Image (tube, rainbow, N blue to C red):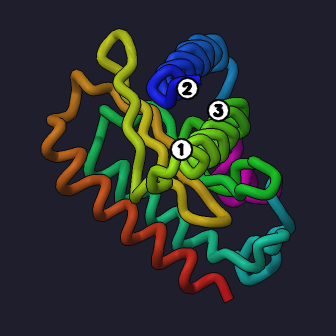
């Protein structure tokens, strides 16, 4: 098959998956409001007395993950609809705001599939983030970070793109990298 056809099929498939997840998000919107982020962290591993998550990737500081999410919430304010940080090994949320467990699993697979397709095509893999422009002015941002990933659903009508790309995402990525670096 022609390389451009493969890429077109991959992008089309990802668009359908993103649309499906957005519809699922609308279904879950009313029935969720999970426990605090520390309780959600237990889904991805055991939470010990020192507020660290222990799972297959090692130990992660929950307070620093929550700080990263708080930084994002401060920068995006009402534009942030939902966000989750998950482990790549089991695709379970370890911290979040308006957590979307189904989105963690599907977007984790999208990151993996996209990187695999890019490698097979001789292209570089995903960089610091990947942005999907959705219908109704919504956006999905994926931040792959090795053994972890961070996804967010954003109302693009309530945030300027420059603020998102030049302030909110760089600060979120820096805070996420700090949480990963301090995991041991």
Q: CA distance from mark 3 to mark 1?
A: 26 Å
Residue 113 appears left or right of 138: right
Residue 47 appears left or right of 63: right
Residue on which disc 3 sits: 103
The residue shown at (40%, 58%) is 128
Asked if 3 appears above or below 118 in the picture, the reply is above
Q: Which residues are magenta?
A: 33-43
User: Is residue 57 in sight in this rendering?
Assistant: yes
* Residue 40, magenta (yes or no): yes
Q: Secondary structure at mark 1?
A: loop
Q: Which sits earlier in the primary sequence, circle 3 or circle 1? A: 3
Q: Secondary structure at mark 2?
A: helix
Residue on which disc 1 sits: 121
Quadrant assignment, res 25: top right
Viewer-closest of 6 and 36: 6
Q: Which circle, 2 or 3, is nearer the viewer?
A: 2
Q: Which mark is residue 22?
A: none
Tag 2 and tag 1, C-beta contact below 8 Å: yes
Q: Which sits earlier in the primary sequence, circle 2 or circle 1? A: 2
Label 2 Cα crowd, 10 Å radius (few <14 / some 14-19 / many 20+)? few
Asked if 65 appears above or below 78 in the picture, the reply is below
Residue on which disc 2 sits: 6
Q: Which sits earlier in the primary sequence, circle 2 or circle 3? A: 2
The residue shown at (54%, 51%) is 150
């Amino acid at each position: 098959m022609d390389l451009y056809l493969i890429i077109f099929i991959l992008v089309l498939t990802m668009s359908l998956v993103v649309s499906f997840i957005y519809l699922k998000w609308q279904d879950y919107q009313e029935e969720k409001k999970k426990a605090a982020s520390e309780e959600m962290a237990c889904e991805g591993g055991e939470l010990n007395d020192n507020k660290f998550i222990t799972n297959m990737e090692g130990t992660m500081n929950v307070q620093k993950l929550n700080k990263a999410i708080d930084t994002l919430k401060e920068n995006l304010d009402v534009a942030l609809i939902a966000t989750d940080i998950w482990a790549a090994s089991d695709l379970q949320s370890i911290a979040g705001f308006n957590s979307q467990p189904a989105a963690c699993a599907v977007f984790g697979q999208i990151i993996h599939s996209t990187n695999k397709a890019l490698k097979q095509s001789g292209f570089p893999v995903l960089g610091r983030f990947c942005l999907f422009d959705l219908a109704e002015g919504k956006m999905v941002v994926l931040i792959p970070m090795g053994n972890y990933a961070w996804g967010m659903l954003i109302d693009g009508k309530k945030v300027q793109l420059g603020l998102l790309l030049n302030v909110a995402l760089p600060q979120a990525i820096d805070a996420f990298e700090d949480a990963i670096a301090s995991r041991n």
